[in-house]
Image (cartoon, rainbow, N blue to C red):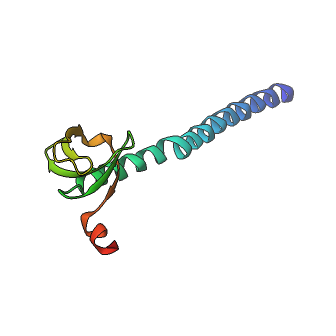
Amino acid sequence: MNLLLTGAVAGQSSIIMVVAYVVIIAAFFYFAMVRPQKKERQRMQALYESLAVGDSVLTSSGFYGVIIDISDDTVIVEFGNNKNCRIPMQKAAISQVEKADDVDKKD
């Protein structure tokens, strides 16, 4: 009888260890992958909401330009000194923003 109880206790402890490992691995994936991605998405959303006409931007393709018009999900960006080079693009194509106020302070 004593031997039978020892086997049952050992079986329960191994199940508890497996569950503990699964919880630890899930927590690792959350803190290593999900949480940083969520923070980056929130940062980019705040960046898109702070866009204003006159801001200098860097697009994801590497072009520098100035925002001349903004709508819900698109912006019109003017590239270079050529007034005819105005391209509409999605806000998601913007990777960095330098505010117009910051540019004035540097000069």
Give percent across and percent down for residue 10: 78, 31
Q: Is residue 65 above or below residue 19?
A: below
Indicate the quadrant where residue 38 lies: top left
Q: Position of residue 94 (x, y in %)?
A: 32, 45
Q: Nearer the viewer, residue 83 or 89?
A: 83
Measured as percent of width and height from the top left, residue 63 is found at 35, 44
Question: Residue lying farthest front?
Answer: 82
Tell me the quadrant of the picture where the C terminus can be found.
Answer: bottom left
| Pick the front one: 45 or 58 | 58
Q: Residue at x 37, y 41 (%)?
A: 60
Foreground of the two, 40 or 102? 102
Residue at coordinates 34% horizontally, 72% vertically from top-left? Answer: 106
Q: Is residue 37 left or right of residue 8?
A: left
Residue lying furthest right in this view? Answer: 3
Task: Please identify the quadrant where the N terminus is shown.
Answer: top right
Image position of 105 with respect to 37: above or below: below
Query: Is residue 83 toward the left or the right of residue 40 in the image?
Result: left
Q: Quadrant of residue 61?
A: top left
Q: Is 21 displayed left or right of 100 in the figure?
A: right
* For residue 95, side relative to residue 27 (left or right): left
Name the one closer to the observer, 7 or 39.
39
The residue positioned 56% from the left and 44% from the top of the image is 32
Question: So how many labels did they put on this image?
Answer: 0
Tell me where residue 7 appears, x and y as whole percent: 80, 27
